[in-house]
Amino acid sequence: MTTAVCPGSFDPITNGHLDIVTRASRHFDEVVVLVTGNPTKTSGLFSIDERVELIREVIAHLPNVRVDSWGGLLVDYTSAHHITALVKGLRSSLDYEYELPMAQMNRRLTGVDTYFLLTDEKYGYISSSLTKEVAKYGGDVTGLVPDSVREAMAEKYR
Ligand code: PNS
């Protein structure tokens, strides 16, 4: 069985992330959406548990996708679970510059390979941080994040 991990901070998951996860689920038998970060840290809009719960709701229709969280090195998670593939989305050359050293470092550490999916043009400008900024000042994030996430963001900024 081939399993891939889609890692990220997912604070919160966007429609761009969800598109990458959905497309990855067609290429691998199983996909784990892995929320990385220190569970005791309070930085970020959502706690790690809240991010996991929001993701759980929006992947519920994808039978071969599940969500987990991890506070250590990504490669320690993949090695412990015998997972040899990571999947990430690339929106632009900026993402490439950011992702390349991480992919090379992860491969050097354990041999894990990183697969890159090009972000759909519809989602190329979406990021968690931009959606938070828009939502924080009362802008409409409909279509940028799943509806349940939009509602959770509105609740946080109320
Ligand atoms: O959503 P992000 O912030 O772009 O995700 C970056 C992420 C989570 C993939 C990266 O920060 C990560 O792998 N964190 C876990 C700690 C780790 O393994 N760091 C070394 C990366 S080479």
Image (cartoon, helix red, strand yellow):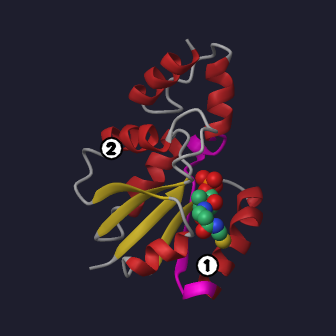
Element class at badge 2: helix
Residue appearing at x 43%, y 37% in the figure = 50
Residue 8 sits above or below residue 73 on the image: above
Residue appearing at x 64%, y 75% in the figure = 103
Residue 2 sits above or below residue 61 on the image: below
Q: Is mark 1 within 8 Å of ligand 1?
A: yes
Dot 1 amino acid type: Asn
Dot 2 amino acid type: Arg
Quarter holding ligand 1: bottom right
Q: Quadrant of residue 93?
A: bottom right
Label 2 crowd (10 A; few <14 / some 14-19 / many >=20):
some
**Mark 1 vs 2, N-terminal side:** 2
Would residue 6 be counted in the magenta stretch? no
Q: Which residue is mark 2?
A: 56
Residue appearing at x 52%, y 82% in the figure = 112
CA separation in Å, label 1 and label 2: 26 Å
Q: Quadrant of residue 57?
A: top left
- Image position of 35 (left or right of 132): left
The circle drawn on residue 106 is 1
Residue 43 sits above or below residue 131 on the image: below
Element class at badge 1: helix
Q: Which span of residues is magenta-colored?
A: 109-127
Q: Could you say which is closer to the camera, residue 1 or residue 119?
A: 1
Residue appearing at x 68%, y 15% in the figure = 137
Residue 90 can be seen in this image: no
Residue 153 place in picture, x, y as percent: 52, 24
Would residue 124 be counted in the magenta stretch? yes
